[in-house]
Amino acid sequence: MLLIYQFIQGTTMKAVVVGAGLAGLTSAVVLKRNGWDVDIYETRNQLGGMCADTEMLGMYVQLFGPHVFHTKDSEVWDFMEDFATFEPFVHTVVALTAHTDKLLPIPYSMATEEIIGRRLSDEEIIEWFLSGYSTKMWGSDWDDLPPYVKGRIGNLRRDDRNINYFSDKYQGLPRYGFNNMFSRMLEAAGGNIHLGAKPDAWRNVRSDAIIYTGRLDAAFDFWYGKLAYRSLQFEISIGSGLAAPVVNCCDPAIDEIRRSDFALFNPWNDKCSKTVIMKEYPKNPETIDEGYYPMPWKSPMLDGYKKRAAEVFPKMQVIGRLGSYAHKNMDVVIREGIDAANKLIGLNT
């Protein structure tokens, strides 16, 4: 078991951070800036978790589906601007439905109504845009999904013509890609990282504190069984452009969940004569690395893991999408990373 030493005023403190995604790197940066030594353990061979990207055809292609950084939190935005030049980007999404051959902007708004030619009822909005999509995404009928998942999928309607997918004050994409941003964060965190580490490599490292951002069930060798996740399979090809950065395939007869056009996620690059198209298909996770979307309503063992974490590692902070077993936006896990580090710093002042 990891030895956690008491805080001693005036000594250099050491933290073990498990996971090199946004939550882990953020906490590592804040701790390093405040004089801590930081040791990072990551089972993947790359930084950034699901936000990692690669360069293809002169554009940045996100390996696990497109992500747009957006937030209302000015502190989070200012923090991330230390590591990336953000190009303004307003995200738009259109829907391919079984009810018309026209692409319809979503979330549903007056702009959507104008294309359809009439106002849809709430029941019709669910049928057109949400029911088929959610069945593919979650493997469950719309009526069987818990309220918080329905809320994440989107409000039923907007009473304006705004077709912007997000409404946050700050929105953008890193000009030189997410991997460049993560590399700069790692440098600011001291660069002490173990990529491709074994899942339990962090356990016997001496430190004053642990920040854990990995899978909660993996931390205990799946003692109660694996937590339920929904995962995705990604298919990349070179093709012609789409009408919007993302097309949601709401028609249940279409196998894909959505399609993305990465030329439209790199609008500042006008040299792209072709584009990279990504199609996403649903699947159940087959390995511990494929847990993308938590399904707590299908995981009765979750409370057991939380209780065990508190008992076995009472001074370990568990944060991030995987650690807290909740689907969270990027700005939320960044905020968690900042707050977790500040909590430790406060204990040592």
Image (cartoon, grey):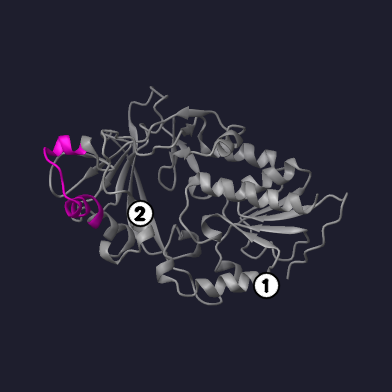
Residue depicted at 65% across the width and 52% down the height: 340
Q: Along the polypeptide, which appears first: circle 2 or circle 1?
A: 2
Camera-nearest residue between 191 and 159 = 159
Q: Could you give the CA–CA distance between mark 2 and mark 1, rounded to whole angstroms?
A: 34 Å
Percent position of residue 302, x then y: 50, 71
Kindly tell me whether residue 46 is visible in this rendering.
no
The N terminus lies in which quarter of the figure? bottom right
Q: Which circle marks residue 151 in the picture?
A: 2
Looking at this view, name the residue that lies furthest to the front.
159
Where does the magenta region start and end?
Answer: 112-131
Percent position of residue 150, x then y: 33, 57
Q: Main secondary structure of the magenta part?
A: helix
**Picture layout, residue 85 above or below residue 181:** above
Q: Which residue is mark 1?
A: 312
Camera-nearest residue between 45 and 174 = 174
* Residue 118 drawn in magenta: yes
Residue depicted at 56% across the width and 76% down the height: 223
